[in-house]
Image (spheres, helix red, strand yellow):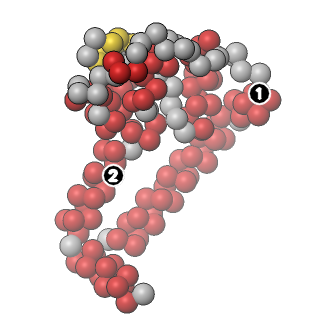
């Protein structure tokens, strides 16, 4: 317990370190939403077909050596392309659309299904949550604000 108290005191004195950790955390958040190893699912548009697509590519052909395949660069690139309105993403010799890239967190998947009007999923829970999506936005925003409050309260 004593080490934890000294740790908090140290970080409160060194605000620069906590600021850097906060910025790095914010810059890495897109990697939670978009996964690079779903690349072939994005290319084959499995979310529109409502079933996982068989890969037409050999898994040894993953662009592992391309810097754009790094999970942080990949996710940030998708977010920037979606903000700019660009449709096409190239990684090595693979090409896919930003509309085919679906998020990983459940709440954002529901928004994705609603925004792109994908009705192939007959799950009643998904249909109910699609109807209450505005309430989910409020809850999601509230949770993020609580997280930020506690982050700044304990570390600054």
* Figure check: 32 above or below 119: below
**Residue 143, picture quadrant:** bottom right
Q: Find residue 25 and name its label.
A: 2
What residue is pinned by disc 1?
A: 123
At numbered mark 2, what does the secondary structure look like: helix, strand or loop? Answer: helix
Q: Residue furthest right?
A: 124
Q: Position of residue 13 (x, y in %)?
A: 22, 78
Q: Position of residue 125 (x, y in %)?
A: 76, 34
Task: Please tell me which residue is depicted at 71% across the width and 21% down the height of the picture.
Answer: 121
Q: Find residue 148 and name its label.
A: none
Q: Is residue 81 visible?
A: no
Q: Is residue 73 left or right of residue 100?
A: left
Q: Earlier in the sequence, mark 2 or mark 1?
A: 2
**Residue 64, picture quadrant:** top left
Q: Position of residue 43 (x, y in %)?
A: 44, 14
Structural distance between the alpha carbons of marks 2 and 1: 34 Å
Residue in the foreground of this view, choosing between 38 and 30: 38
């Amino acid at each position: 317990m004593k080490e934890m108290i000294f740790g908090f005191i140290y970080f409160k004195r060194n605000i620069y370190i906590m600021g850097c950790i906060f910025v790095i955390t914010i810059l890495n958040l897109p990697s939670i939403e978009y996964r690079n190893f779903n690349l072939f699912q994005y290319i084959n548009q499995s979310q529109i077909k409502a079933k996982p697509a068989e890969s037409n590519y050999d898994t040894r052909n993953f662009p592992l050596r391309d810097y754009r395949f790094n999970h942080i660069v990949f996710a940030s690139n998708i977010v920037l392309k979606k903000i700019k309105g660009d449709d096409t993403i190239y990684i090595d010799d693979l090409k896919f659309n930003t509309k085919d890239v679906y998020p990983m967190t459940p709440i954002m998947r529901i928004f994705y299904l609603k925004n792109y009007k994908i009705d192939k999923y007959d799950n009643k829970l998904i249909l109910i949550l699609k109807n209450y999506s505005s309430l989910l936005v409020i809850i999601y925003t509230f949770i993020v604000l609580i997280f930020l409050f506690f982050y700044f309260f304990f570390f600054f």
